[in-house]
Amino acid sequence: MSLSKPNRSVATLTTTRVTPCPGSGICVTCVDGCEGPCEVGRSALLGKEAIYPIPFGVISAGAEKDYPVDFSHFNIQGTCVGAIGIEADPGKAIFPAVDVTTEIGYKDKIKLKFPVFTGALGSTDIAKKHWESIAIGAAICGTLVTAGENICGMDGRAEFKNGKVVRSPEMERRVNIFKEWYDGYGGIVVQLNVEDTRIGVAEYVIEKLGVDFIELKWGQGAKNIGGEVKLPTLERALELKRRGYIVLPDPENPAVQEAFHKGGLTSFERHSRLGMVDEESFYKEVERLRGLGAKHISLKTGAYRPADLARAVKFASEAKIDLLTVDGAGGGTGMSPWRMMNEWGIPTVYIECLLYNFCRRLEEKGKYIPSCAIAGGLSLEDHIFKAIALGAPYIKAVCMGRAIMTAAMVGNTHGRLLKEKVEMEGEDIEEGLLRLFNGAWTLKERYGEDFKKIPPGAIGMFTYFERLKQGLKQLMSGSRKFALKYISRDDIMALTKEAAEISGIPYIMDADREEVSRILG
Ligand code: SF4
């Protein structure tokens, strides 16, 4: 059985004429005269432009490969006995009483109202467009939001001095929006990649914008190269090449400029450079950032090979950083080569099992284990529960990129439709929002007049979090765990032998074996 569906996907708007061969994806009879709606056919016309999901700038794309083991291969254990973390009294042990707050960090802990935070929103158009909603959403949900890579470098209005950024209105906007709504939970994280480090983003955001949480980025789950975006104009391509980015094809080449003007080339690609990880440089960089004033440091690593995950765990432990986020394959992003998204990297469940084993090995040696978070294709409360259980006690939170973006986008779409209705029919917009979003009344009660300033996307994100929160509390109370810290590996079971072998979680028919023997004698 093939796990992939090459040569056709809704992500690339491609399809086959007749049934495809499982391996190649090429039609079992590829006929001369077909216009080529498949990925190979499209590539004959579009070449490199056919590598990416479309339409760029208005989508987030997620991998569609069906990995042998995912979170559906585990089920959550329930029990009818007792309650942990609360008095075992039916009048008190009710699901609304479940504590879903968490905290991350080394010494100076950051409290989160819910164990979910956003993926990095970097320089893609879609991230920029929805930042206000997601940043305000994160602040009112009491969680972390991450300003991703290349924001200053891509900012058309940014000012530079001796190659270093001295002002970036876009970064200012991003930081200020979050700070305006921050109420003591969560925080804003600014991510650094190779280019950001070169142009001095950390110095700028720490010294000028008062950011105190910096994330070092090694990679992500959706691709194993740096971040990339499409550039629709020649001027923009030339500007970013001048700023030191890799821009393809070379916008300074006269033949490329001619192809662009004639329409054979419709856009340029801006790529980031590959980071070169090494142990000493990592420790030096963490110290440098602390010296600049960063109070919290996190490391975000991608679905790299096990040795690299071991490096991430060890370096994070030695440098005593606050958060290690591991992003497994099977997730998504604003722009990534489609086949790469599907075919590279260690899938989320597998990489989380490796992470658990590596943390345990270091902990047995008495080493510090940073707060860990897992990412890569998670969207609902059962995913959160299983992800925390599978990596317990090390997983303190879950990072959700696309799911949060989806909630914010849907919120904004309905907000726009409501606005159009208001303009046509004269309805009160606040009344409309209160009717539209189930979570709106809570925000109205909490923020009063300021409720009007909350974008619909943020209300959508908050309402989605309310659903996740209740769903997680229900699952936890069913397992009789009344706080996140009590969730353990014992709270899930493996439905397949393969899932049991990968994870060390008992196969469903072996679970509770000793206790069963004790009970039955
Ligand atoms: S060119 Fe046409 S017939 Fe050939 S594989 Fe593509 S869709 Fe099928």
Image (cartoon, helix red, strand yellow):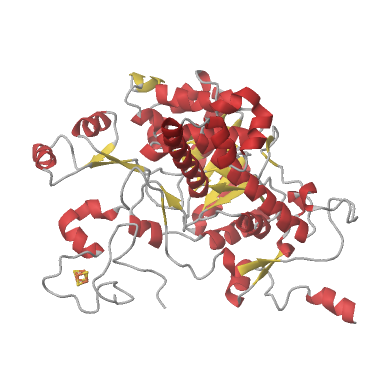
Taking the spot 33% from the left edge, 62% from the top edge, the residue there is 9
Where's residue 432, x and y in %?
A: 54, 36
Foreground of the two, 11 or 433: 433
Where's residue 399, x and y in %?
A: 56, 47
Taking the spot 15% from the left edge, 69% from the top edge, the residue there is 34
Q: Picture quarter containing residue 107?
A: top right
Foreground of the two, 134 or 334: 134
Residue 476 to residue 231: above or below:
below
Residue 126 to residue 517: above or below:
above
Foreground of the two, 137 or 494: 137
Where's residue 273, x and y in %?
A: 34, 41
Residue 380 showing in the rendered view: yes
* Residue lying at the far bottom of the rendered structure: 521
Which image quarter holds the C terminus?
bottom right
The quarter of the picture showing ligand 1: bottom left
Asked whether, in this view, residue 66 is left or right of residue 484, the answer is left
Where's residue 155, x and y in %?
A: 35, 27
